[in-house]
Amino acid sequence: MSNPNKDTPVDPMIDRETRSYEFPVPSREMVLDHLGALGEQQSLKEICRALGVAGERDTEAFARRLRAMERDGQLLKNRRGRYGVAAKMDMICGRVMGHADGFGFLIPDEGGEDLFLAPRDMRRVLHGDRAMARVVGVDHRGRRQGAIVEVLEHHHHSIVGRLINENGMDFVVPDDKRITQDILIPPGESGDARQGQIVVAQIVAQPGRRSRLAGRITEVLGDHMAPGLEVEIAIRKHEIPVQWPQAVSAAADALAAQVPEEQKQNREDLRDLPLVTIDGADSRDFDDAVYCEPQKNGYRLIVAIADVSSYVQPGSDLDREAYQRGNSVYFPLRVIPMLPEALSNGLCSLNPDVDRLCVVCDMDIDSQGIVKDFRFYEAVMRSQARLTYDQTAAILIDKDQGLIERYRTVLGSLHALYDLYKILRTARHKRGAVDLDLPETRIVYDDNKRIECVVPTVRNDAHRLIEECMLAANVCAADLLAKYKHPSLYRIHEGPSADKLEDLRSFLAELGLHLGGGDKPDSKDYGDLIAQLEGRSDITLVQTVLLRSLSQAMYSPDNVGHFALGYVNYTHFTSPIRRYPDLMVHRAIKHVISGKPIAQDKETQASVNQQGEHCSMTERRADDATRDVIGWLKAEFMMDKVGEVFEGKITGVTGFGIFVELKEIFVEGLVHVTALGNDYYHFDPAHHRLTGEHSAKVFRLGDELKVKVVRVDLDEARIDFELESPLGGEGGRKRNPKRDKRTKKAKKESKQSKKSGKTSKGRRQRRRKSK
């Protein structure tokens, strides 16, 4: 740092800056501390003088740092060129979330209440942009309203959509309905694209106060409804990396076809152990192999996982690309892998009868299903069989003699695995994991990659057996990392929020059900409730509501446990071929077992936290993309069924209508609130129902209905139904008059309580405190 004097404050991050830069300048932390303490804005010259920055070289480097801080939303520069701390100027930085109706929200980086953005503000930004906004008031719904001050980062550089022509001008209508601005394509920039085709438009002008969104067409994906087009659209809409960079392809090509002998040295040799893989019939990458044997006081369980970390070194081209992808994406009939095929289906895949490197979790489990001891080590293995779930179930449950004879060499381990599985399932129930057995479906495709039918998914004990083995290994991996406080990612899942918990209990009370645990129920409280549902006709309804009360699991270095599984420590260790967090966990485990753990300092913590956020994002990205594709395929499947009547069940209730899943074909569509009859309907989110103000009709989650398919919109992958009739009656259910009286009485008491400053909730809280 240039020209410091006795009055120059000491940079708290001087060691980091010196390590990172040949000519260090004041750190971001020092700048924020200085301007925050000062309480006023300063020019570049004034900040340089205060922090001891002098000389052309250092001043220019420091100016770049201030511009970067401005870009990241830490600083704000006013029209006079003076910098201030954004947080001190009532500015909020965050990510823009658009809505199909033109408005949007700013999701603050630091958490807290979202800012409503009116359509006029959304004209300056696109869904996904990072922006800085100021609070300008409260809208008519009582939401904080913001105004965009500055766009910090443009998220979209290209957008996929359909080419149209209006009044002689070409436009691209974005496929992503959260982007409501059409893209102007200037004359000569449409290339060979024809009207109506699906194209990719590169953005050449972002929207602003005095500019509109404009672009040029760089790729023609194809004609509307062309086979496979839905996947191409989803890939580009969600910006999923598909092409391998040349350096990555070269690195993959340089790998040997088989494991070199020298790499097998200094590892435990498990090649004579009857390890097997058990996966789906169409699986191609095999992450995990299992083996089990009975012992005096229980069982020895070995879970061997492909040693991807031996081939994908930190910072390598393969590693950087794997991190960007975050995970493999499984579209119908197509996979976008995290690793090149030479690794995912080759060297890293635990194929039968070939030597493979692996990382092993070797566990001793007692007769109560408790892991008494475990150790991790590197090994070389040779899978003795590639089994499918159906084959394994046929051997263990159906006693298929042909398969028993074919796989005789691994039978002892399979039977031990099945016995251990039953013990682990019992332990799971005792632990109180949230074990929701909700129906799932599988899509069957024809030769043209179109849906032939949708059928229920059948999960057998072989699926559950492997699941329990993987859970046990994941817990051991998390226990190891927690014991040594080694920086890594945990798979965390927090309990329900206070609002969701209140709504859930209100819903359950109407059904005569109770969730224990007070303000902080745990997974055992959920498990006890689920046990009460056995034999009830509304079991699926209640389990659906329970699921919706829970938060989404994510990756984080902060080990807060996994609520649904009932684990204090949990991580992902068992799928490094298709999940980057698992690869990170493998590296961390190797550091620990080699006696070379990485120190847990602030810089490492920040880096791992960023990796967790990125991997959580890529997981959501994959889920959103596959959901888009399946939604489009289901809409196409229903196109020739317009006018037909089906029986269905309400699977979702919103303020704008009810979602109904059709029986037998398992496709969901919307009955818009305007199609429910000539009435005004009140939406009750806590009880998942719509109630007619004049007719007293009630449409509730789980109700069975007859609906007619009236419209299919492929552009929006939307299926619209019209109410035909509820099963066994006319119109919706009538309200219960006694319940109505209780509700009116409760509302009256609530109003009186609010006037006196007392609520029933407040009284309950005071009673609890007094006990």
Image: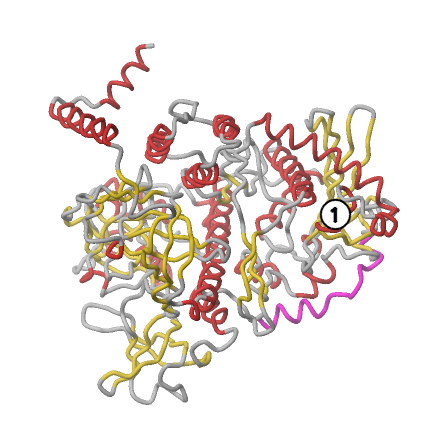
Residue identified by numbered label 1: 289
How many numbered marks appear? 1
Side of 445 relative to 742 (left or right): right
Residue 284 position in % (x across, y down) = 69, 60
Residue at (81%, 48%) from the top-left corner? Answer: 400
Residue 770 position in % (x across, y down) = 30, 10
Q: Is residue 63 visible?
A: no
Check residue 208 for magenta coloring: no
Nearer-the-camera pick, 597 or 555: 555
Amino acid at dot 1: Ala
Residue at (77%, 27%) from the top-left corner? Answer: 298
Report helix, strand or loop for mark 1: strand
Q: Residue furthest left?
A: 755
Find residue 715 and report its image quarter.
Answer: bottom left
Q: Write down the region rendered in magenta.
A: 245-264
Residue 152 position in % (x across, y down) = 31, 59
Side of 602 relative to 32 (left or right): right
Find residue 23 and report its image quarter.
Answer: bottom left
Q: Residue furthest top?
A: 771
Nearer-the-camera pick, 274 or 426: 426
